[in-house]
Amino acid sequence: MKFKAVMMDFDGTITEKGSIFPSKEMINKIIETARKMPVAFCTGRQLESFQRRGLGAIVKEIPPSEKKEILENIFLIGENGSMGYFFDKKTGKYKEFYRAKWDDDFLTKRKLKKMIGEKIEEYGEVINEHRVVLVMRAHREDDSPIEEIYAKSKKMFEICDETLSDYNKNYEKYLHLGDSGIGVIICPAKGDKDAGIEKFAKFLEKKRGMKFSKKFKEIMVIGDSAQKGGNDYYFLQGRFGTPFTVGHFDKTKPLPTPVLNSKNKRLLHSKGAIYLLENIENL
Ligand SMILES: [Mg+2]
């Protein structure tokens, strides 16, 4: 397989479990990769949070003379796949290139917030910063152990699943629910991370003249929350791209592929992502 682009989840994939920023080694690997091919981050975060906490750390390490060229190869598929941004060289800013639609006929976001808000209060809160998706972040103190945050996030997921199932037992046709470990995301079914892969590929075909085979197999896709209910579940099913997992792995399923080192040991989180980027031309 000759990979032509890469798309990665952010939290738990290029960062270590529980940490907000990628390591310097990871950042250097991302910059090196972006010199060769388009790199997209696919995260639950919205643009501003990504720029503040994710991209900002990467930009600092890019040599100033290369900044524009490299940023042109760094894309953001935000809000869990519901929004896409590219770097516009002319204005020096990230610009939207697609936005998924929330199906108000099924259930408005306002009503959904009302249905869920109070029930999750004990475990987390609704964040009102996203343009399309509804996000709940687990309560955390500076010294909260990550396991405690995971547990709160899981609890919120269960509450949302129950509430939505009561509203309509086929809700998954309209809305997808995902647990990222630090929070819960509800997005339009057509605006999940798998849709993000397709939008990213089509942008590259149209604007960069790149060519992909059916299902865009030449896009390497990396994530960690591959379990049913995880926010990479749809991302790593293989509907589009070639998926790898650096987190949850089910050996009874053909995809996603786990990342193994030369001693057949699994590489998790950023260790797995670094290994994949290092070997992207030989896999
Ligand atoms: Mg993740």
Image (cartoon, rainbow, N blue to C red):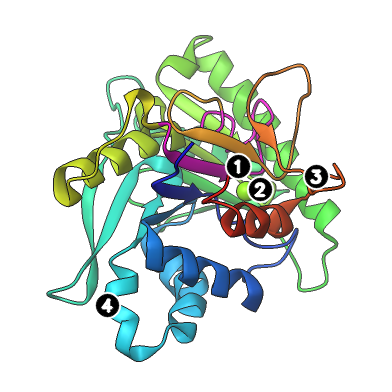
Estimate the x, y position of residue 283 in percent, counting from the top left: 58, 43
Q: Is residue 109 magenta?
A: no
Residue wearing tag 3: 151
- Mark 2 is surrounded, within 10 Å at the Cα level, by few (under 14), some (14 to 19) or many (20 or more) other residues, namely some
Residue wearing tag 4: 68
- Mark 1 is surrounded, within 10 Å at the Cα level, by few (under 14), some (14 to 19) or many (20 or more) other residues, namely few
Q: Which residues are magenta?
A: 217-236
Q: Nearer the viewer, mark 4 or mark 1?
A: 4
Residue wearing tag 1: 118
Q: Nearer the viewer, mark 3 or mark 2?
A: 3
Is 103 rendered above or below residue 200?
Answer: above
Residue at image location 73% in from the left, 58% down from the top: 271
Mark identifier at residue 121? 2
Q: Is mark 2 within 8 Å of ligand 1?
A: no
Is 216 rendered above or below residue 200?
Answer: above
Toward the top, the furthest residue is: 169
Q: Nearer the viewer, mark 4 or mark 3?
A: 4
Residue at image location 35% in from the left, 90% down from the top: 64
Mark before the other along the chain sequence, 4 or 1: 4
Q: Amino acid at mark 2?
A: Glu
The residues tagged by marks 4 and 1 sit, at their Cα atoms, a distance apart of: 45 Å
